[in-house]
Image: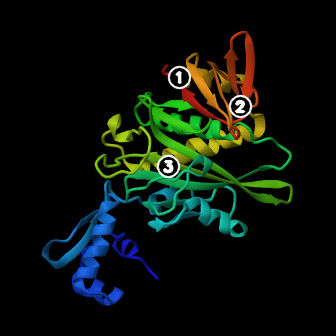
């Protein structure tokens, strides 16, 4: 059954009378549903007997994005459980570079199973389907995605975003964006991938439930247009992924990473399942693995096995 949020996602006025009839509920029950959404940080106006969702920023224009990328399918689902999940469950009908965008995720996921919170129209959220040769290593792919996002933000007017290995973008030490890459099987010698990204734009501080220090892109680009942001990110991402397929992690990329690495030459902790390893972060190697200097010893780590934290002690 269609949810109240899905009905309100057009951001047009809806009468109490029509909504109570649609959901076969009383005014009091409808108000309770509205209050539940409001507690999640979703702005809803109930003045004059009407109910209208107020987006944190103007709604995305899938039409404009599709015009820029006519060869790719742009799927716009205003309210969805997970953009990654939609692509994963429809892989057989997708082509390389097809994209799903949304205003709000009800079950967005981050790395290592963490929940990714998603206020309505307060983030730029998308998933892209991509393919690589099944015999090619995808180590370093999330770094390539992160660099592409940073380049897009630079193009739009700010070079303040930094990278955190393996899949975060930071602003002033706080999380600005996250990346989740999932594999979806091999077909005709090609490995199917789903690349999910969430970028904070205008998340309301009083109502968010994000369990870590976070930042909004509006802090450095106060007039940012989410549609233009996504167009710029997609342009940079398609180019970066194509280069990654051809050349992998190049020496030039390693140098660019060091220049934009928020933790380069800082004391950090590598957190494994049963131990913590402290050392000085020294960038990445040719596989995109983290390089750590521990005393006179050099160690490398794969992004799938550890978490990285700055050592503030």
Relative to residue 304, is residue 227 depicted above or below? below
Q: With 150 as the anchor, is 208 left or right in this view?
A: left
Residue at left 25%, top 70%? 52
What is the CA distance from the residue labelled 2 to the residue labelled 1? Answer: 22 Å
Q: Nearer the viewer, residue 81 or 127?
A: 81
Looking at marks 1 and 3 on the same chain, the residue that comes earlier in the sequence is marked by 3
User: Callout 3: helix, strand or loop?
Assistant: strand
> In the rendered view, would you say 45 is above or below 194?
below
Classify residue 258 as left or right of residue 135: left
Name the front one of labels 1 and 3.
1
**Image quadrant where residue 45 sits:** bottom left
Q: Which residue is mark 3?
A: 198
CB atoms of marks 2 and 1 within 8 Å = no
Element carrying mark 2: loop
Q: Residues within 10 Å of mark 3 (few under 14, many from 20)?
A: many
Looking at the image, the residue that sits furthest to the front is 274
Quarter-of-image position of residue 139: top right
Q: Position of residue 126 (x, y in %)?
A: 53, 55
Question: Which residue is drawn at the image coordinates 37% and 52% (left, top)?
Answer: 122
Task: Give the distance between the C-alpha atoms of the residues marked 3 and 2, in whole angstroms.
Answer: 22 Å
> Where residue 81 sits: x, y (%)?
52, 65
User: Dot 1, crowdedness within 10 Å: few (<14), some or many (≥20)?
Assistant: some
Check residue 311 in the rendering and tell me which mark sits there, or answer none: 1
Per the image, the residue denoted by label 2 is 288
Q: Position of residue 258 (x, y in %)?
A: 60, 21
How dense is the environment of label 2, judged by Cα within 10 Å: few (below 14), some, or many (20 and up)? many
* Colouring of the image: rainbow
């Amino acid at each position: 059954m269609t949810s109240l949020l899905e009905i309100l996602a057009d951001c047009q006025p809806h009468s109490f009378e029509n909504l109570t009839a649609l959901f076969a509920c009383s005014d009091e029950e409808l108000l309770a549903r509205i209050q539940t959404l409001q507690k999640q940080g979703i702005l809803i106006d109930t003045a004059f007997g009407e109910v209208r969702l107020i987006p944190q920023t103007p709604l995305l224009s899938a039409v404009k994005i599709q015009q820029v990328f006519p060869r790719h399918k742009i799927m716009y689902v205003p309210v969805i459980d997970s953009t990654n999940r939609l692509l994963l469950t429809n892989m057989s009908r997708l082509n390389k570079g097809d994209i799903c965008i949304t205003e709000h995720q009800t079950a967005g996921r981050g790395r290592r199973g963490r929940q990714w919170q998603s206020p309505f129209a307060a983030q730029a959220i998308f998933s892209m389907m991509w393919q690589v040769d099944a015999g090619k290593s995808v180590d370093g792919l999330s770094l390539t995605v992160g660099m592409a996002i940073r380049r897009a933000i630079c193009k739009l007017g700010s070079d303040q975003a930094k990278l955190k290995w393996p899949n975060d973008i930071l602003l002033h030490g706080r999380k600005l964006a996250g990346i989740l890459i999932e594999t979806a099987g091999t077909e005709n010698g090609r490995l199917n991938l789903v690349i999910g990204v969430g970028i904070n734009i205008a998340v309301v501080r009083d109502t968010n439930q994000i369990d870590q220090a976070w930042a909004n892109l509006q802090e450095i680009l106060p007039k940012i247009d989410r549609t233009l942001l996504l167009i710029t990110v997609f342009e940079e991402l398609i180019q970066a992924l194509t280069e990654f397929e051809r050349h992998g992690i190049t020496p030039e990329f390693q140098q660019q990473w060091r220049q934009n690495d928020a933790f380069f030459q800082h004391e950090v902790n590598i957190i494994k399942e049963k131990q913590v390893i402290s050392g000085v972060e020294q960038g990445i190697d040719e596989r995109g693995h983290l390089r750590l200097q521990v005393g006179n010893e050099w160690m490398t780590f794969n992004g799938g096995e550890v978490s990285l934290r700055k050592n503030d002690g």
